[in-house]
Image (spheres, rainbow, N blue to C red):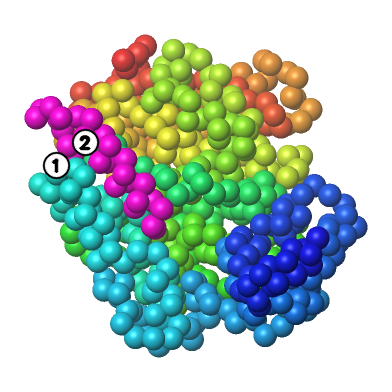
Amino acid sequence: MFKCLSDFVANLYGRYILLIDEYDIPFITVHLANWSKEDKQAAQGILKLLFQTMLKDNDNLRKGLLLGVFEIPLTEMGSGANNIKDIRMVPTEVNDIESSILSADQPHTGSGIDALTDSFWFNAKEVGLMLENSIGWCPRIARHKPFIMDEIRSWYNGYFIGRFRGKYNPWSVSSFIEELCIVLNQSQSRRTNIKRIVQTAARSYWVTTGTTGLIEAQIDRHRAQFTELAQKLLRNYELTKLNEDADKTMCEPPHVPLNSTQLNLISLDQDQFSEPGLLTLCLFAGYLTRHSSTSVCIPNHEVYQVWLKLFARAVMGAEMADNSTNYERGALLSELWRGKTNILRNLAISSHGVLSNHNKFLEADYANHFANTIVAVSRFGMVTHPKQPSIQLSDMVPIRENHTGLGKCDYVMRLYSTDNVANQFGVVVEFKLIENHQRSNAKHHKACAERGLRQIAERNYDSCLYSCLERMDIGVAIGNNVVYAVSKLYRRESEYMPWKEVDSLV
């Protein structure tokens, strides 16, 4: 069929240039399919034959141009697609970028590969020109242009394309400006809070058009390893943003290392976790960017939102992560204050998915992964103090001890506000293991949880909450798909006064 179409076009126009967009998608679809090894090999054979027909055994072809996210080794697959010239948006080796890094503030005026890669995505001058041109459509933008540019920079800038640092995502920038103009033109009142409209329009656009299927496949197979990796990336991004917001350079966070990005996607073994392989997938797909010649980082706030969801998926599992965003702010604390533990039980059971075989793990393992779960839901606001309507990144301080059996509590988190000391609130959790032979013994579950609660008070585990005036102690008995929790609430007049147990903190 393709040969007939090719002959028809050639008879009308002569030899042609063949454009193949998203050439990698069929290979990715086969790679992710729940098929047998033999069926996947058969499907790859069909794709190989198709590309051979289009690119090698095609006398009508002048040149072929293939566009895609991931590099598929067509030559190694025997497709006959020889003499391929790669034009990469992402530098693959240290030598590709360490010689000279170019600024994307101005367009490249030279020739060759640099001029070509500079045409990928927007530079600062092009974004400024788009915003300037939009004033004719929406004049109210003119008065707030610097603020709008700051929002665009925070949400959609930060990419390292070729040797150019500081590129903007074109789809997101265009969608943001379009949405902003529409909303501003519809809100003609002089009392309109334009800055709030700008902040509302700044949201995820590009990431909702793609798929994280390849990444999610790795997450679901290797949840514990991905959890650790995602925590590093999220923490580094948050520390970097804190440095920028404070308008001063503090300690530079250690970014996640990645030297080589040579990756054969077709031969990638999904049953074996490979941190360089996963980082390369994320780099090629735009969910990471180069920070230096040997490290990667989260580029901007739009992609940061994706990593929060991926982190939640790794810690809580796909179903619980999807449901976590449906809970109201402070839902977990509010439920515990009322003596209920439904959310806590669901979170604990879902966090067990991080462990491959529960029978071989000890109390410390359950404590570690359940603490990860609480960190995840904290990021989505489920542990927000009711007196504090919003939580900044610096307001949530998880103190991860994880020294089970060594005289220290398993997990502590402090929520605080620098504006009002009365808002400072602490959560102390002690875990106790439910052995498999006691899984059906409800009295034993309760006794274990209460023993954990007593241990917090007897061993003064709250000592690290020196600045908090309110706290919740939680004893959690946890085992293989079993969880039982009890809690107590405390308040004091000042940090130098003793704690007093109370019935409610609301």
**CB contact under 8 Å: marks 2 and 1:** yes
**Which residue is located at x 27 percent, y 60 percent?**
127
Name the one closer to the observer, 495 or 304: 304
Asked whether, in this view, residue 422 is left or right of residue 332, the answer is left
**Which residue is located at x 75 percent, y 56 percent?**
31
- Disc 2: which residue: 184
Q: Which residues are magenta?
A: 169-196
Q: Quadrant of the C terminus?
A: top left
- Disc 1: which residue: 140
- Residue 312: give its label: none
* Secondary structure predominantly adopted by residues drawn in magenta: helix
Asked whether, in this view, residue 299 is left or right of residue 409, the answer is left
Where residue 390 sits: x, y (%)? 28, 32
Q: Earlier in the sequence, mark 2 or mark 1?
A: 1
Q: Is residue 428 visible?
A: yes
Measure the C-alpha gap from mark 2 to mark 1: 7 Å
